[in-house]
Amino acid sequence: MIKQKIAFAMIMGAITTGLISFVVVSVNIGYNARFLAIWSRSWALAWVVAVPAIMLIAPRVERLVQYLFGEGKRP
């Protein structure tokens, strides 16, 4: 089960940070000669932060959603 949670966090982190960093970098600097270098650095940094955050936050969010929909006990 832990392997699946780690895989989920890594994949979800890669997709979300990739999309968000692409949009933010393109809005802030536009598409120029340094775009790819800046975007890949931003993506890597965001991914390193996001994966542990997902691992820590996702179980709590899951419990909160279960609580809100009456499927569990307190969060």
Image (cartoon, helix red, strand yellow):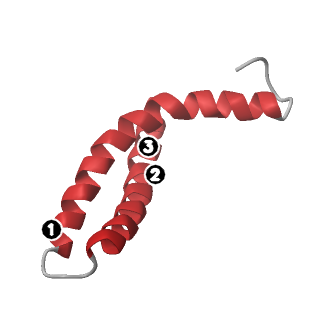
Please identify the residue farthest to the right as the structure is shown.
70
Please identify the residue farthest to the front as the structure is shown.
28
Q: Amino acid at mark 3?
A: Ala
Tell me the tag on residue 9: 3
Tell me the tag on residue 12: 2
**Label 1 secondary element:** helix
The reply to whether callout 3 and callout 1 are in contact (CB within 8 Å) is no
**Label 3 secondary element:** helix
Location of mark 1 (residue): 37
Does 13 sit above or below residue 6?
A: below
The alpha-carbon separation of the residues under discs 2 and 3 comes to 5 Å
Quadrant of the rendering where the C terminus is positioned: top right
Counting from the top left corner in percent of width and height, residue 32 is at 19, 82
Q: Is residue 11 visible?
A: yes
The reply to whether callout 2 and callout 3 are in contact (CB within 8 Å) is yes
Residue visible at 37% across and 41% down in the picture:
51
Count of numbered circles in the view: 3
Q: Earlier in the sequence, mark 3 or mark 1?
A: 3
Q: Earlier in the sequence, mark 1 or mark 2?
A: 2
Counting from the top left corner in percent of width and height, residue 44 is at 24, 53
Does 6 sit above or below residue 75?
A: below
- Residue 59: quarter of image: top right
Is 44 left or right of 65, judged from the image as shown?
Answer: left
Is 28 left or right of 35, judged from the image as shown?
Answer: right
**Label 2 secondary element:** helix
Residue visible at 24% across and 48% down in the picture:
45
How many neighbours does mark 1 have within 10 angstroms: few (below 14), some (14-19), or many (20 or more)? Answer: few
Question: In front here: 33 or 9?
Answer: 33
Residue visible at 26% across and 73% down in the picture:
29
Q: Amino acid at mark 2?
A: Met
Residue visible at 79% across and 18% down in the picture:
73
